[in-house]
Amino acid sequence: MIDIKSLYTATTADLTAFDMSVLCEWRYGKKKPVFIYMLENNEVLKTAIAEIDAWTATNMPILHDLVSGSTKFKLGLSVLIAIIIKAQQEGKIENARYKEFKDEFASLINDAFNDAKAQLEKLHGRKEIDARGDMSDAIVYDRPSNLHEIGSAYKKFTKLTKWVDENTDPAPILFGLTNLLDEVYVFHVANKELKEIITATVRKKAEPNLDQGEQFTCSCCFRPIRLQNKKSNIIAYHGFTRDWYGITSTSCKGSWYEPFEKSCEGTLAYLKDLNGLLVSQKEQLAKMEQRFAGMAKEDEEYKKVFQSIRSIKFLIEKQIPSTQEMLLRRIKDSYPDQHPEALELVELGGNNEISI
C-alpha cells in the first residue's frame, strides 16, 4: 500500500500559483482552453505533470497502464493528483472545486476498474466469476465506482483473497482487482484528508450582461435586477404577477429603492415593515386563540381556525425571524455603520432573540 506522504510529494513543484478552477476544468468547461495553453507554455505546470506521471508509472503501474490507453484519462490522472497536491500545499480546497474533483475522480475510478475487469476476463475467462457466489458478487457488483467506495471494496476483496489462499483456489481476476485496489487505496486516504480542509465557496458577483444591461442587487429580495432605465438609480419593477385581465400585483419593495451596492435604505425599510407585520400578527394570533378557546371540535369553523393559528405561529416564530436574521447579516457585512440602526428596528418589533 502506498504511503500518503509519497503521494503528496509526487512533484516538487509549487502549485499554489495556479487557479484551482482551471485545473478542475482540464477536460471540459469554459477554462479548458486556458488549461491547455498553460500546459503548453507554463514550465512549472509541465514539470509537475511530467513528475507526477513518472511517479504513477513507478508506484501505480497497473493504474498507469490502464489510463495510458484511455483517451479520456491519459492526462487526467496526473492532473487530479496535482489537484490533491495543490490542496495540501494550500491547506484548503473550495467546496465547489472539491465536488468537481470528486466527480472527475469517480469517473476515472469507475472506468479503470471496468477496463481492468474486462481485460482480466478476456485473459482468464469467466469460470472464476461463476465458481463462488460471494466472489462473483465482489467482482461484478462491489468494484468501486468512486473514491468513497474504495475503502469498503478493499476490505471485502482482501478478505476474499485470504480465503482463496487458504483453500488454494485459483482466482486471477480477484487477485488482479485486489492489486489495483492496493494501488488506489491511497486516494481513499487522500479524499478523507481533503474533506478536513474543505472551505466554503467564494462566489463572485455575476458579470454584467452587456446585451441586457448591467444587473445590481435588490436591497430586499437580493436578486440580480437591472435598473429601471439607464438614467435611473432605482431597481426595476420585479416580483409581481399579472393576471388574465392584465392587472399587475404589487412589486417587490426593493423596486422603490437604490440597489444594495449603493445603499441599504431599502433593506432598513423592509426590516421596519417586517416589524410592523410581526406586531400585527401577534395581535391577530391573540384574537384567534381567544376565539379558538371557546370553540368545540364539532364547530364548522374549528379546523379552519386551527389551521390559521398554526400558519400565524409559523410566520411569527420562523419565517419573519429568519428573514430578519438574513437582512441583519447582509447589513452587518456590507454596511457595518448602519448595523446598530438595523438592530434597533428589530428590537422595536419585540424580537429580542436576534442579536446578529
Image (spheres, rainbow, N blue to C red):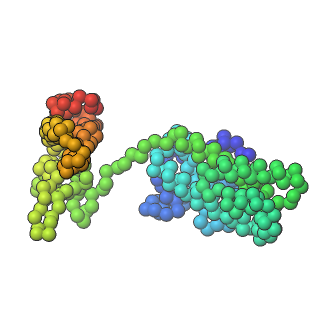
Q: Is residue 312 visible?
A: no
At a point 67% along the width and 49% down the height, the residue shown is 152
Relative to the observer, which residue lies in front, 31 or 167? 167
Q: In the displayed orientation, state which residue is furthest to the right.
A: 168
At a point 25% along the width and 52% down the height, the residue shown is 223
198 in relation to 355, above or below: below
Q: Is residue 85 left or right of residue 99?
A: right
Q: Is residue 48 left or right of residue 315?
A: right
Relative to the observer, which residue lies in front, 164 or 100? 164
Estimate the x, y position of residue 243 in percent, counting from the top left.
15, 66
At a point 18% along the width and 45% down the height, the residue shown is 262
Q: Is residue 117 visible?
A: yes
At a point 77% along the width and 49% down the height, the residue shown is 159
Estimate the x, y position of residue 81 in percent, counting from the top left.
60, 51
Q: How many marks?
A: 0
Q: Is residue 302 left or right of residue 5?
A: left
Q: In the displayed orientation, state which residue is furthest to the front.
A: 298
Estimate the x, y position of residue 30 in percent, counting from the top left.
43, 62
On the rendered image, what quadrant is the C terminus found in? Answer: top left
Relative to the observer, which residue lies in front, 133 or 28? 133
Estimate the x, y position of residue 146 in percent, counting from the top left.
60, 55
Q: Is residue 120 left or right of residue 274?
A: right
Relative to the observer, which residue lies in front, 259 or 345? 345
219 in relation to 341, above or below: below
109 in relation to 245, above or below: above
